[in-house]
Image (spheres, grey):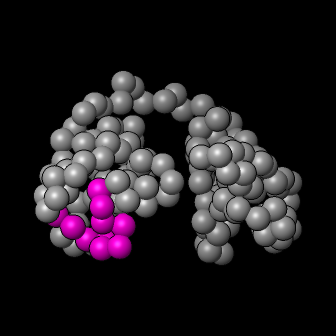
Amino acid sequence: MNQMTAAHKTLPFGTRLLVINRDTSRTAEVRINDRGPFVKGRILDVSYAAARQLGVAAEGVFPVRLRVISLPKAEAPAGPRDVTVEVESDRTKAEAQRQEVGGVATVGEVTVADQTVYRVDLGSYSTPIQARAAAQPLAARGFPLLVAPR
């Protein structure tokens, strides 16, 4: 939410877009890192940081024009993947989440925009298929998961 990112239904991950607010002509450069929106009539979901830059953080829906700045060079190799459960800003909450997940989960500490956040790491898997298979039971229990390349 604090990065200049967006969700699009079909553009490849890593695509860079110039988003133009048609009402104000304010712009933001974003990187596609998610799928969506899944609401009829909407073409893009922007992060909170991008919405702030576009001057629409409180509005939610606004007219846009999009321009592709660049496409990703190539797909990342299908190598090892890490499975991470929800990012927490509180170490105590992250520890509680780790205990609920169980298994060999660990709490990792990362810095995002000069703020320390904690995440619950479930481990690394040899293939994307193994990582998604490991994440599926937790996703079914309602855990927000991120399966990402190392």
Query: Is 90 in front, or is 39?
Result: 90
Residue pictured at 23% horizontal, 60% vertical: 43
Which secondary structure type mostly characterizes the magenta part of the structure?
A: loop
Count the marks: 0
Magenta part of the protein: which range? 54-63
Q: Say whether residue 47 is visible.
A: no
- Which is more toward the observer, 44 or 22? 22
Q: Is residue 92 above or below residue 1?
A: below
Residue sitting at 31 percent across and 72 percent down?
Answer: 60
For the residue pair 84 and 66, the one nearer the viewer reads as: 66
Q: Is residue 32 above or below residue 143?
A: above
Q: Does 138 sit above or below residue 124?
A: below
Let me know if residue 126 is in the magenta part.
no
Q: Position of residue 90 (x, y in %)?
A: 76, 64
User: x, y (%) of residue 132?
Assistant: 60, 52
Q: Answer above or below: position of 27 versus 71.
A: below
On screen, residue 43 versus residue 87, left or right, reads left
> In the drawing, does residue 32 fall left or right of residue 119?
left
Residue 82 x %, y %: 67, 44
Instruction: Determine the residue located farthest toward the top in the rendered image.
Output: 73
Identify the image quadrant of the C terminus. Answer: top right
**Residue drawn at point x = 62 percent, y = 74 percent:** 142
